[in-house]
Image (tube, rainbow, N blue to C red):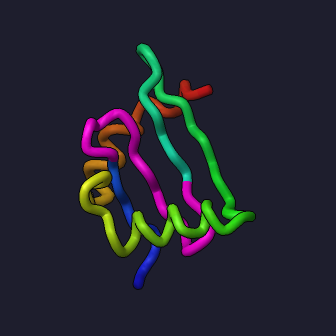
Amino acid sequence: MEFPQYRRYKNGMSYFKILNDSEFVEYKKEGNSIAKYPLKAAILPDRNLILDMLHNPEPYWDVIEEAEFLLFTRDSNHAT
C-alpha cells in the first residue's frame, strides 16, 4: 500500500491523512476553522483504528483522493 492515504468521516466533518500504518493527521471542522490533530499510534486501539481506516472503511469512512483532502484543508493554515 502506498502512503499517504486519505479518508473522511461519512458526515464530512473530519478528514484524515494517513501517513503510514502507525500515524495519521486528522483535520476537523470546528466552527469556522479547521483544527489539526496528529496521532502516532502507541497503543493497540490506535493501531486498530488506523488498520480499520486503511482496510475496512465502511461504514465510517469514505476513501477519498488527495485533491478532495486538499480542498477541505486549504484553510488549515489557520488551524489550532
Residue depicted at 40% across the width and 64% down the height: 53
Main secondary structure found in the magenta portion: strand
Q: Taking 65 as reference, is 45 left or right?
A: right
Measured as percent of width and height from the top left, residue 77 is found at: 54, 31
Measured as percent of width and height from the top left, residue 44 is found at: 66, 68
Screen quadrant of the C terminus: top right
Residue bounds of the magenta highlight: 9-24
Q: Residue furthest right?
A: 42
- Considering only vertical position in the picture, is 69 above or below 33? below
Q: Taking 36 as reference, is 40 left or right?
A: right
Q: Taking 3 as reference, is 10 left or right?
A: left
- Residue 19 shown in magenta: yes
22, 45: nearer the viewer: 45
Numbered label tally? 0
Residue depicted at 61% across the width and 62% down the height: 45
2, 9: nearer the viewer: 9
9, 6: nearer the viewer: 9
Measured as percent of width and height from the top left, residue 8 is found at: 33, 49
Q: Taking 6 as reference, is 24 left or right?
A: right
- Residue 12 shown in magenta: yes
Measured as percent of width and height from the top left, residue 54 is found at: 40, 71
Residue depicted at 64% across the width and 53% down the height: 39
Q: Residue furthest bottom?
A: 1
- Considering only vertical position in the picture, is 55 above or below 13? below
Which quarter of the figure has residue 46?
Answer: bottom right
Residue depicted at 62% across the width and 70% down the height: 22
Which quarter of the figure has residue 23?
Answer: bottom right
